[in-house]
Image (spheres, coloured by chain):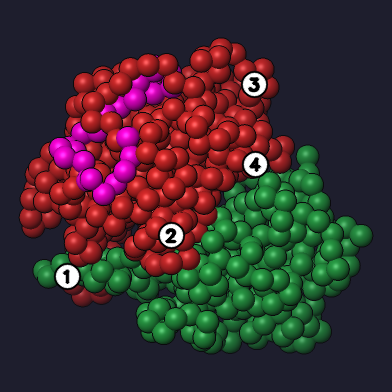
Chain colours: A green, B red
Amino acid sequence: MSTATIYLEGLSLLGPGMSDWAEAVPRLLGQQPFQVDEVRLAAPSILPATERRRAGAAVKLSMAVGLAAVEDADADAAQLPNVFSSTGGDCENCHSLLEVLASSERMVSPTRFHNSVHNAPAGYWGIATKCTEASTSLCAYDATFGAGLLETVTQAHSAGKPCLLIAFDTAYPEPLYAQRPIPYPLGVGMVLSPEHSAVSKAALRLSFSDEPASRMDDAQLEALRQGIPSARSLPLLHLLASGQPGRVVIDYLDDCRLAIEVVE
Amino acid sequence: MQALRLSAYTLTSALGAGLASHLDALRRQRGGIVRKRWETVEFDVCVGEVAGLDEVVLRQDLAYYDCRNNRLAQLGVEQDGFIASVEQAVARYGASRVGVFLGSSTSGILSSEVAYRQRDPETGALPPEHRYRETHNAYSVADFVRRFFGLSGPAAVVSTACSSSAKVFGTAQRMIAAGLIDAAIVGGVDTLCLTTIYGFSSLQLVSSNPCRPFDGERDGISVGEGAAFALLERAEQPQDGDILLIGVGESSDAYHMSSPHPEGLGAKAAMAQALQQAGLTPADIDYINLHGTATPSNDAAEGAAVLALFGSATPCSSTKGHTGHTLGAAGGIEALICALALDNGVMPGGVGTQQLDARLQCNYLLTTVERPLRHVLSNSFGFGGSNCSLVFSRVGA
């Protein structure tokens, strides 16, 4: 069975060779050549100065895609329950903490420790946007995008109002990089509403499927799709970029994928 | 919200493995926190440790998930006939219609902590036997439990620090309400590790003695570990004695990463929303299981929030003096302590608390009270300002 229809109100993408959604559209559609490129991340100005100084890649990336999706939806971030979904959270911070704990001087920095919680980016989001709505932070390894999308859709229907999805991944440095080689940071933001409105861009319905996942025609985009959990969303983003109705299957768990219909 | 029935549940913590040892500990006000040298920690620390984890052997087909956290998960599901209950649900609904939503804060990070001490001196590489995906990654415990039961439905780990395994009840409720699944395994598993012992110590939030929630002399937490598992299904025809989840409230402080809002505004919002979803007023709540970590600021903020919403008469206590603060497992453990309280008519008196903080005006129970209960509320609040409150009821009480 499918979920009730959910309406996309805002969308953002930040990753290699795609610095925002407008730049991504022609590349996803093959109208412009796609070339992976270094991802530039800036500390968001809405974060208080102290927090801004401490912000690592995970906070910068998640906040950038969140703010862009909210802006695209012409929404108020403070009003949106939010779902953060990431396979590793702030991986650089985790690595630093592990190095200190393996050293002879286990002088753990209090800031490093409170930044080590998986929901640290969500905590900074709340502080920056003054959003006191429900917020969750998920992980499902390679299934992290699908898990976040399902959580956001069901949360929006239960809450009866738009919710924000921020799916993002960054990489660990070595030595953990060898076990979890995420080639580039990539983040996707979506504002999803249970009601049709003036800002609705597309209507979506989700269901579980055992069909194989849709693939990207472009070899580099396909490599990103397979290499970064949040990039498992690329077939859906490709369909949304086309502005056409259609259906894609995206990877979720090994034995449980997500079929997404874009209707109208 | 659409109520859910807890058709099975089980607990493992420093109080023992299974519900019987927990009920006994609540009745007798027995705590499980001990002072010891744990792992390679360079100082004595008071911890709520689960006995026997070093001896647990994972099921052979899942041996590659071996780490302290998944050992505790397996020990946890093996108690109280929980496996049989899940198997019956799978037979009723199908393996793809049962979800797995678990909370954990640090998962099996202890495995990476040890592996970082064993890096190759030449290359810096981790030992080849280290398995990040199955141990350290936040999802590993849900992955393990999903495979343990041969499930093929949706799954995720919620990792919002100390509210993690309370919030999974909301995730499951919404997923069932959406019709995507018929049942869910929820709960949480978190285990002792260096990250939390050294981390909370760096913030000067660890007591040098077993923790004393709501005590005027409280000076920090005792880190604990534990596993909580519940099977949730729709409550279409509730029977007398059924335990139901009837309200979930979630909010964010938007205030500070590691300190609660001083007036407990986020905590109050979560409790109020849980009551509203349950269709109850504060006066309907018979007992509150407090988050009650025993840090000066957390208990002050929660006390203020409870006073503002409930007044000072509602019986309440924290069970962190019994179990220690089990972090990502705490929300699940305390939710199921509430279920145990409803099932048996027990309001646990606090452990460790000697002299109540006179500034916290609430009816904090220093001795266990036994009487039938109808509606209880459980609070869980975490770093990053993540708050969750749950309301449970006993049918026909």
Residue shown at 37% from the left, 82% from the top: A50
Residue shown at 48% from the left, 84% from the top: A43
Q: Are marks 3 and 2 in contact (CB under 8 Å)?
A: no
Distance between the Cα atoms at labels 1 and 4?
42 Å
> Position of A264 compared to B109: left or right?
right
Query: Can you tell which of label 4 and label 2 is closer to the viewer?
Result: 2
Q: Three-letter amino acid code at disc 4?
A: Met
Quarter of the view holding residue B204: bottom left
Q: Earlier in the sequence, mark 4 or mark 3?
A: 3
Quarter of the view holding residue B89: top right
The crowding category of the residue bearing disc 3, from other C-alpha atoms within 10 Å (few below 14, some 14 to 19, many at least 20), is few
Q: Are marks 2 and 1 in contact (CB under 8 Å)?
A: no
* Mark number displayed over residue B108: none
Query: Can you tell which of label 2 and label 1 is closer to the viewer?
Result: 2
Distance between the Cα atoms at labels 4 and 2?
24 Å
Report the span colored magenta.
B340-363
User: Can you identify the residue that label 4 sits on?
Assistant: B175
Per the image, label 2 sits on a secondary structure element best described as loop
Q: Position of residue A150 (x, y in %)?
A: 65, 51
Residue shown at 22% from the left, 45% from the top: B357
Distance between the Cα atoms at labels 1 and 3?
52 Å
Question: Do callouts 1 and 4 point to residues on the same chain?
Answer: no
> Position of B158 compared to A71: left or right?
left
Q: Is residue B87 above or below residue B366?
A: above
Q: Chain of mark 2?
A: B
Q: Earlier in the sequence, mark 4 or mark 2?
A: 4
Per the image, label 4 sits on a secondary structure element best described as helix
Q: Chain of mark 1?
A: A
User: Can you identify the residue that label 2 sits on?
Assistant: B385
Residue shown at 59% from the left, 81% from the top: A16
User: Can you identify the residue that label 3 sits on?
Assistant: B92
